[in-house]
Amino acid sequence: MRILTVLVAILLSIFSTVVMSYISIAIPIGPWIAPTLALLAIIIFKIFSHFVSNYSGEIALATSAGSVGGILATALGFYFTTLYFLDPITFKAWMENYWYFILVVGSLSFVAGMFGIWVANLFETKLIVKDNLSFPIGQLVYKTIATYKQVKKSIELIVGFLITGIFCILQDGLWKIKSFIPQSLTIISPASFAIFKIPIVRLDLWPMLWALGFVTGHVVAIPLVVGVLSKILLVRPMYVLAFADVSWMEYIITFCSGIVLATAIFGFIKTPKSLFKTAKSFFKKNEKSSDAQKSLTKNVNWFETIVLLGLFTLFLTYFQFPVLSQIYLFVFSFICAYQLAIIAGKIGLAPMGKFATFVMVPAMFLFPLNYVQIVLVTTFVGICGGVASDILFGRKLAHLSDISSSKIKIYQYLGLIVSAVCAGAIFWFLINHFGLGSDQLFALRAQNRWMLINTLKNAKALNHWVLILGLLFGLILSKAKVSPLLVLGGLFMPVNITLGLVIGAIGALFVKDKQEWYPFWSGVYASNSIWMLIKAIL
């Protein structure tokens, strides 16, 4: 192991954990950070090129290690923060005990992440070599690294990084430099027309949102716009006309709970089918499946398996999980992680939320779980499934780069250890400084899950008509193939965040090949992320 490569791997692991911790609780999307890490690694290795002769393999190793922290932080931001809304007393008590909070988050991250790596180790040969799945993110990173000699890409990233850094300093000020760029611009002042109410439309001058909007494009922009327009033209008027006797907050939470419930229902209809189809193809009696099962048995590392089982049991026993619930979580986490790996291998996405819900909901009714245990179940499934997918992206990169599987495993374990150690401290700092539920850390995904759990636990206490209307609206959105969860973003999030993402998406319409601009916007994304952290510390 080269010292430089190890140091870069550690640096990228910390960077990806910091950035994605913030992103995952600030906005409702969690983009893969690996391509950005690859570009950063290219620049670092170019600077220190006299220490390494041929560094494309070193870039791949450092990038694969660093990306583990990104998906780990994303799962924690999406699911673990749900506890703040479900059980604020317990969450506050954990936050007041700094070291305990770090230990809980770190232990959960390491055990669930190790589970994800274990699943990836078992199925690496089958999915990458025999089934030859594309794992698009791995291929994208490979192509990025393969063109490292093209100075243009590195320059574009540096330009994006520097321009954004200068912009942020001029906007917020630093030491003797006074700020003169405004934080935001008011486009439309609040106005009311009969039963319609237009909220204040403010554009936050936040480059990170523009970068994310540019990369995600219309996939995110359209549902967000639908959400904002629905709030003005449908949701608010219904409240004024029929439900004015209920508080607005109770009404909007119940309506949104109906949308979340509709999403869960669709997930429950589709998920078992895909899991059954996968299991059937794997265990079907033919020569191909027999070879796959033999390969699986051959890939089992019994020492790693025994250590994982021990840590898994120890962690869940500490939180007083019933034995049957532990077995349930192990079996279904394994199944869901495998299915997520297949999906990620085909389309480059890992829909962790759908599978986390699929495991969480039956567990709520089968076992006497409290809110802490429910959140741990959800987060565990999200982390192990996400990490399994990310690890296989890295293994695909290694396969294309002629790097041995055993070598890249070492770096991926390093990435897991570093991110698990620092994740708790990062989340504690962000939550303590910005506050969950605030405009800066709105935690929409966590609030969505809180609404679902609250609906299932306390359905009798909710206004059933409002819940049904939200459910019907969610079903219509699903049928129209418009993401209900992103519509919730436009419906529930501050308009300024939605507008920033939409403007970025509109900007992507004016370029011929938006992938050519990815290095520049990766620089913008990285620079604004680092500045947010510096500003919070100072």
Image (cartoon, grey):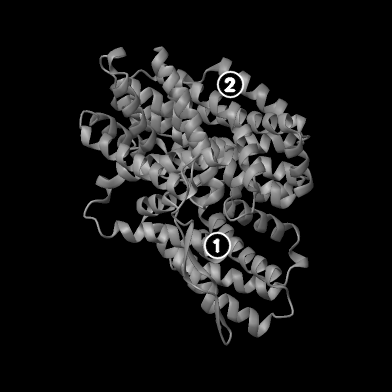
What residue is drawn where x is 61% and y is 36%? 331
Tell me the SS state at disc 2.
Answer: helix
Q: Position of residue 52 (x, y in %)?
A: 30, 14
The amino acid on which the numbered mark 1 sits, given as a three-letter code, is Pro
Kindly indicate the quadrant of the structure image that contains residue 429.
top right
First in sequence, mark 1 or 2: give its number. 2
Q: Is residue 286 visible?
A: yes
Q: Position of residue 464 (x, y in %)?
A: 70, 72
Kindly indicate the quadrant of the structure image that contains residue 222.
bottom left
Residues at marks 1 and 2, CA–CA distance in whole angstroms: 45 Å
Q: Position of residue 97 (x, y in %)?
A: 76, 34
The amino acid on which the numbered mark 2 sits, given as a three-letter code, is Thr
What residue is drawn where x is 64% and y is 43%? 433
Tell me the SS state at disc 1.
Answer: loop
In this figure, which residue is indicated by the disc labeled 2? 305
In this figure, which residue is indicated by the disc labeled 1? 494
What residue is drawn where x is 24% and y is 55%? 511
Q: Is residue 207 left or right of residue 511?
A: right
Residue 527 higher or lower than 124, as above or below: below
Q: Is residue 218 or residue 97 the one in the foreground?
A: 97
Q: Residues within 10 Å of mark 2 (few under 14, many from 20)?
A: some
Q: Is residue 241 left or right of residue 504?
A: right
Q: Position of residue 33 (x, y in %)?
A: 42, 39
Residue 425 higher or lower than 57, as above or below: below
